[in-house]
Amino acid sequence: MMRLHAMILLGVWGCKQATEPGTETRTTPPSTQPAPTPPSPTEPTPTATEVPPQLPGDHDDVIVSTEAGSQWLFAVGDGTWFEGPFRDDLGTADAELTPADFDGDGLVDLVVTTSAGSEVWIADGVGWYDTRWTDSGTRLGEALLVPSDVDGDGQSELFVVAPDAWYRWTWTGSGFDSQLFGGSGLGEVALTSGDFDGDGSDDLVITSMGQSQFVYSGGTFPALTLQHGDDLVVDFVPFDMEGDGDDDVLVVDTTHGTQFWGSGPFGHWEMAPDRLDLPVDSVQYDVGDIDGDGREDLVITTVAAVSLYLSRGDGTFDADRIDPHVLGEIAYTVLDVDGDGSDELLSTTDEGTALLTMGEAGAMLELGTLPYALGQATFTIGDLGYWD
């Protein structure tokens, strides 16, 4: 389940080209300031008598962050939620939550970033966190955090784009070892993570001014370079259309619209005709296995409507319009609340948030609702481990 449904879709801000990864190693992240006092996970865990029956297998829970704070919601599996702790010090203006599995136990850990610095919370398996680590140099609005398991060991590394450079942080059990990886900093480089060669280890797309480089874990640097104009904004959307473990990718820019790149053998890519009508800033792609067939599908929101594209596994899709709302009027979050392998959707509009699932006839059915309208909340998704 630890393919977190939070895609890293980053553009090019551009100033200078990313440099080749180096070998400088530090035992602590780059910070010379005194240790901060960011929020600590001290909320009590709800008592065992409040816990509903266990869900089968892994499943996704939700942390809902609003201006007022962050609410932990544990999925019951039928469209309802068991309300966990609420943190009024973790509002959307106060903190950013980055989910990843740093210790490889299958549960979602958190990097909590505030104006005081960043703190790593390790899930304790009963719905809360006990191990933590702080860095005062990584503060809210001053760093970009991208989790990626580049060595394929089940434990996510954390790539940190700081103002002056970017780094790879590796969890040691009690903290992070930091390695300098590139000389371009925040606003000069963007990272996208996906397993493009199907070896079980995440790879990176490193985007800087004028080019994007596909860098395969354990391979040469770079494996593939895509040249583009200096002022071009480009998004990369990884998804496994065939269910074979190799991520395909949508390349979305201002010139070509949307390009479909299908991953082939030996690092080759198969290209489909450009969709010039779907340029960046005019389309939103959300990825998940909506019908539970092991292949990832696309929810495509445009200036016309919302369509669900179910992958056939051969580069073609069965498409159906599922909502009349247009881009800017609706947002989707992908999650699997019942652990059955079929992803559900949180659909958020001005009227609130609905939890949708695909019914037997292929129609999207409403399982439940949450009282959060568009623009009021962000959703952090993952197995929080309350009753695993």
Image (cartoon, grey):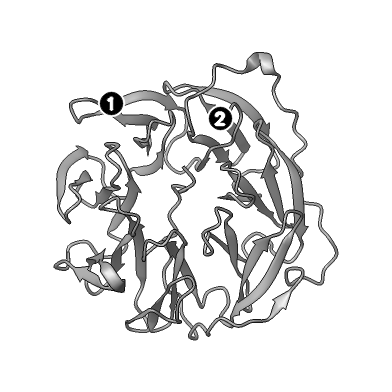
Q: On the rendered structure, is 118 left or right of 148?
A: right
In terms of secondary structure, where does tag 2 sit? strand
Residue at x 31%, y 72% (from the top left corner): 267
Q: Are marks 1 and 2 in contact (CB under 8 Å)?
A: no
Q: Which amino acid does label 2 sit on?
A: Leu
Residue furthest to the top in view is 49
Query: Identity of the amino acid at label 1?
Result: Leu
Q: At 44% from the left edge and 31% from the top edge, which residue is drawn?
A: 337
Q: In which quarter of the image is residue 181?
A: bottom right
Q: Earlier in the sequence, mark 1 or mark 2?
A: 2
Residue 116 appears in the figure: no
Q: In which quarter of the image is the C terminus?
A: top right
Instruction: Tell me if mark 2 has few (under 14), some (14-19) or many (20+) residues whose alpha carbon lies within 10 angstroms of its own.
Output: many
Residue 238, relative to residue 6: is it above or below? below
Quarter of the rendering containing residue 354: top left
In the picture, the disc for residue 73 is 2
Q: How many marks?
A: 2
**Which residue lies under the disc numbered 1?**
365
x 14%, y 44%: residue: 318
- Residue 339 image position (x, y, % from top left): 43, 31
- How far apart, in angstroms, are the residues tagged by discs 1 and 2? 21 Å
Image location (x, y in percent) of residue 142: 63, 66
Disc 1 packing (10 Å; few <14; some 14–19; many ≥20): some
Foreground residue among 152 and 167: 152
> From the viewer's perspective, is residue 161 above or below residue 117?
below
